[in-house]
Image (cartoon, rainbow, N blue to C red):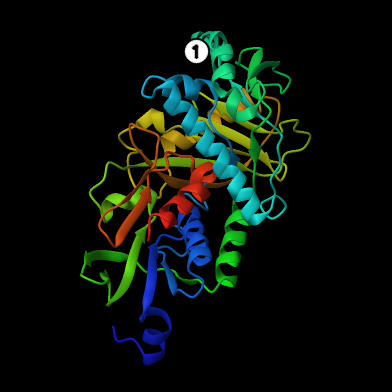
Amino acid sequence: MNLSYWEQHTWFDNVDFCIVGSGIVGLSCALQLRKKHPKAKILILEKGILPQGASTKNAGFACFGSASELLSDVKNHTKEELLNLVQKRVDGLELLKSTLGEKQIDFRQHGGYEVFLKKNEDTFENCEANLQMFNELLHPVFKANTFKLKTNDFGFKNALPNLIFNPFEGQIDTGKMMQALLKKAQSEGILILNSIEVKSFSTEAESVHIQLKDFDFKAKHLLIATNAFASELLELNVTPARNQVLITKPILNSSIKGTFHLDEGFYYFRNIHNRILLGGGRNLDSDGETTSVLETTTRIQNALEDLLKDVILPDHNFEIDQRWSGILGVGQQKSPIIKPISNRVFCAVRLGGMGVAIGSSVGKELADLVD
């Protein structure tokens, strides 16, 4: 493919920073770089029409981990590591809100609830027994008790009568958030090109040689923010994990308001525009959902519908409006990988399903790696 003079000169000549991935991390990184380097040429490349992974496909949870998730995380993290993880998530959400404004992302702090099925009573009892420990552990972050019990007043069936509630959790409009990020980046003179996939790169003495499908170019620095797809360009411990989602058509007289977690966070649901958005279920087919293929499967979609019928909306007639999937980047540890690959190449990946919470701060940390 031969570029015109205008195409080459405008987009691909004298690039100071090339960022791969136009999701939350990539855009946040670009905005931070612009603050540090007001006159730099910053180019973002995105292989999809929209961000390919989860930035425009997530549920819009402004959360930091339910009680059962944190209890599970204690098995693989020290309490200090867990405290740091939660602090990073809280700080990231505050950075996102301050960068874009709460109104622009439609932030609403209705609180978060954890629902326990009757068959999971042991898990609930274990969480209940550890609530004081978590409240003490997280007190430095929230300056108040994080978790408390609340009665199930939402009409959930086949569930225990008590929920675990935290008042600090909120929700956002994912589409508005990404639109606001894109608008802010473009207003700062940051170049964004879609449907362009980076095939490979090599570091040279004073630049990085970047190979695309049809042509190549050079940049002074390369920053990789592709999260789940990082292993396509780098040898890193990042595993893609597909999460499937559905959303109902508008429902009359639903009392459900807030963000809800179920089964150690493997399922999650919320209200949005008089609808219920429900996602998860990858634990039903861990091998099959360890993939970067953006598809839905009958098995998991049926399980999500059953959860709506049997637990969440047992007394409502509902119809499914849309179904989709997003790809997370996960690993045994939940802390992201933010590090230099060489003196000119850097990465920030493996957000562990917490992209909304930590994406902004991870993008900032990525930019701060560059001299």
Q: Is residue 224 left or right of residue 246?
A: left
Q: Is residue 194 left or right of residue 155?
A: left
View extreme (bottom): residue: 5
Q: What residue do we see at 42% from left, 62% from top?
A: 48
Q: Secondary structure at mark 1?
A: helix
User: The N terminus appears in which quarter of the rendering?
Assistant: bottom left
**Between 225 and 321, the one nearer to me in the picture:** 225
**Between 205 and 237, the one nearer to me in the picture:** 205
**Between 358 and 7, the one nearer to me in the picture:** 358
View extreme (right): residue: 253
Q: What residue do we see at 61% from left, 13% from top?
A: 160
Q: What residue do we see at 71% from left, 21% from top?
A: 155
View extreme (front): residue: 371
Please provide percent x and percent y for residue 231. 27, 50
Q: Which residue position is annotated with label 1?
A: 123
Q: Is residue 66 left or right of residue 255?
A: left
Vertical placement of residue 66 versus 105, above or below: above
